[in-house]
Amino acid sequence: MTHARRVSSGWRIAPWVTRVGAVVRRLIGAPDYDGYVAHRRLCHPGEPLLSRQEFYRLRLEDRYSRPGNRCC
Amino acid sequence: MPKPLRILFWIAIACLGAAGFAALALSRGEPVNAAWMLTAAVCTYLVGYRFYSKLIASKVFALDAERATPAVRLNDGRDFVPTNRWIVFGHHFAAIAGPGPLVGPTLAAQFGFLPGAIWIIVGVVLGGAVQDFVTLAASIRRNGKSLGEMARQEIGPVAGFTALVAVLGIMIVLLAVLALVVVNALAGSPWGVVTVGLTIPIALAMGGYLRWVRPGRVLEASAFGIVLLILALYAGQWVAQNPGIAPTFTLSRTTLAWTIMLYSLAASILPVWLLLAPRDYLSAFVKLGVVVALAVGILIVLPPLQMPATTAFVNGTGPVFAGKVFPFVFITIACGAISGFHSLVASGTTPKLIERETDARMIGYGSMLMESLVAILALIAACVLTPGAYFAINAPAGLLGTTVESASRAVQGWGFSITPQELSAMAHRIGEASVLSRTGGAPSLAIGMAQIFSSVFGGSAMAIWYHFAIMFEALFILTTLDAGTRVGRFMLQDMLKHVWAPIGKVSWYPSVVITSTLIVAMWGHFLYQGVMDPLGGINSLWPLFGISNQLLAAVALCVGATVIIKMGKARYAWVAILPLTWLVIVTMTAGWEKVFAADPKLGFLAHARVVQAAIAAGAAPAGVASLAAASRLAFNDYLDAAVALFFMASVVVIVLASVREWAAVVGGSKAPESSEVPFEPYGELRPQAATGSQV
């Protein structure tokens, strides 16, 4: 946030759009691949990563296979 | 704020809330402003959140921000992800808020606005929010275990099994009644059929976009999807106004019922990325958007409530559904006051996202207060209609007849007034051929919402707003149908694999097709029965749904009370036992009346006897086409009675099993062993410093 304010031409919008986008994606329950990658890099560096497609497939399968992600 | 000032502040809030209730209850004769209902609700929520949820958080569970949550301990970047609490709050709210809190209060408005409002406001603070919060906290302390697993572990295998079967039973009834709501909203409405039908190719296009064009760009795809939804709204209008095409899309209730069954079957077999997931994103956006818009709209307009505080129908003679205000207002309004289904969400995805234990108060208790507010908004939207209009829309054709003249006379007979001209004009304003007998709550809510929205933006676009509201309700009901059929299929596969192992293979096509068809056939049967029912279907199915939902709430509260007692906090177990007692009284009374009441409108068995007597006399009863249809009707009455008895028996089994467990622990014959995961400090595991999951 702070570095965005330092830009002399005013506020930079792109980082905010990215941020708001990330929040909205998680609100509606879309898979968070970037978060997954960040977690793996931090906690399990060097270990293999799922591809974006594979990660999406697994998350969606999990989300829609048991009760508990939606209500009446 | 200094302490004396704080005390004064809370006294002021409490007084304001009391004033709201007083204005609602003491109004006689002239319409009360919706502002009073909002005031009563919001002030009660504030007091409940500040004091009651605090008691549960600190005294009962002793929630500790320094105690590591499963999201932190088991962080894997997939299932368990420590997440900002506002995001979890929004996510949890979006998951619990479905069509339930919109439909239930609308139907319960037949008693007047007061019984529903009191139950929604008081029920949530002492019941619904407590259930959600306690289940969430218990699940967080047990690595995010599901309700079924907790029931088995805490109470015993019988309770666990009963909970499992009950969940499946509830899903079946829920899917049937929601499908019936959509059928009733779309029957004879080419505009609605085209708009809602177009949401399917729109979702498919989004799915393709997300798969092949720009993988993972959910927001882009959703933005396109929303633009297309608006176009679909106008496409529907164009079709409806075009006499050459309109008849093709003017479908009967029977055709719609079959279409929805086939659609759900296909949707639950197709891969999730293609239809279900994109539809779910769209539906989440539209849902959050409409809830906010409705709240803002009501705040701007502050409409007067045309419905009286109570109507004569509290005596059980109401046309929308049969039964007295006690116990039926408590059955009709489940979501919004207390909804057992939430305990599945509170022990599903949410506990795996919470970063700090203390966040559970805001997310568990707070989200449910928000849902209750949605129910209040729906009640307000239903009550801005004049009672005459409300009953003409929500009473079945068996009571109204099929012309505006007969409907006007019937409404007059109930002590309200609406002229045939007013009914025709209303239908014309919303772009429909008729508003009569559009039972199920969705259309009257949509008309109420359209009135509110068009008085904010100027009154010309009533028809567009009406169909927007219908599309919004149908969109997320259809999403629930797809997802529910799918989940039901997995549950069925899981159960049947003990009978025949190959059926358990989740990706084996024959098993997928067989079990999906079975699930659709089960809810489809109830849907079809509802469509053919001369009393309108909602009359029998919605109470069954309410009873089953409250049964699940009873399971959750039993688990909650058991967990609390086993923590050694038996003196606080009343927090869960108080709402549990009320639910047991309500469900058992309602279940008993639905099965055994002598009034054939109310009791399933009495109705079956009337139908059978007619068959024996050789004549089909009024509104039934043939003798064969009449015997099916009688069979369905027995089926409904059996389902209600099954739900009641489940309540008894679970409550008895729990009481035995409580007595053993409190009486000292069983040690109060807590199954909580032992304390681990948050500080050493917090996400930034995480060194990987150790557990």
Image: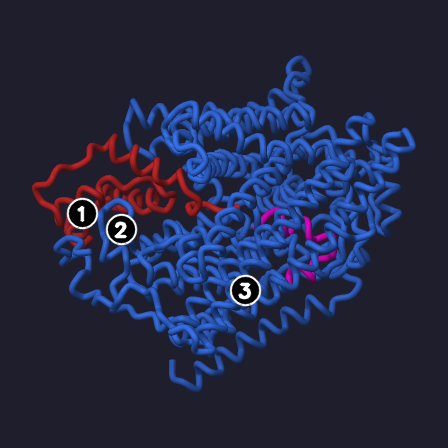
Position of the N terminus of chain B by quadrant = bottom left
Task: Give the CA separation, mark 1 to mark 2.
Answer: 9 Å
Residue type (three-letter) at the residue carrying disc 3? Gly
Q: Earlier in the sequence, mark 2 or mark 3?
A: 2
Residues flagged by tags 1 and 3 on a common chain: no
Residue type (three-letter) at the residue carrying disc 1? His
Task: Please identify the dominant SS of the magenta region.
Answer: helix
**Left or right: B345 as drawn, with respect to B320:** left
Q: Is residue B181 above or below residue B343?
A: above
For this orientation, the residue located farthest to the top is: B244
Q: Colour of chain A?
A: red
Q: Quadrant of residue A52?
A: top left
For this orientation, the residue located farthest to the left is: A46
Q: Secondary structure at mark 3?
A: helix
Chain given the colour blue: B
**Residue at image location 53% in from the left, 57% down from the top:** B553
**Percent from the top left, x then y, of residue B77?**
23, 46
Residues flagged by tags 1 and 2 on a common chain: no
Q: Are marks 1 and 3 in contact (CB under 8 Å)?
A: no
Q: Are marks 1 and 2 in contact (CB under 8 Å)?
A: yes
Q: Is residue B575 above or below residue B210?
A: below
Label 2 neighbour load within 10 Å: few <14, some 14-19, many 20+? many
- For mark 3, name the chain: B
Q: Is residue B255 above or below residue B166?
A: above
Mark 1 sits on what residue? Answer: A39
Mark 2 sits on what residue? Answer: B81
Mark 3 sits on what residue? Answer: B127
Residue stretch in magenta:
B101-117
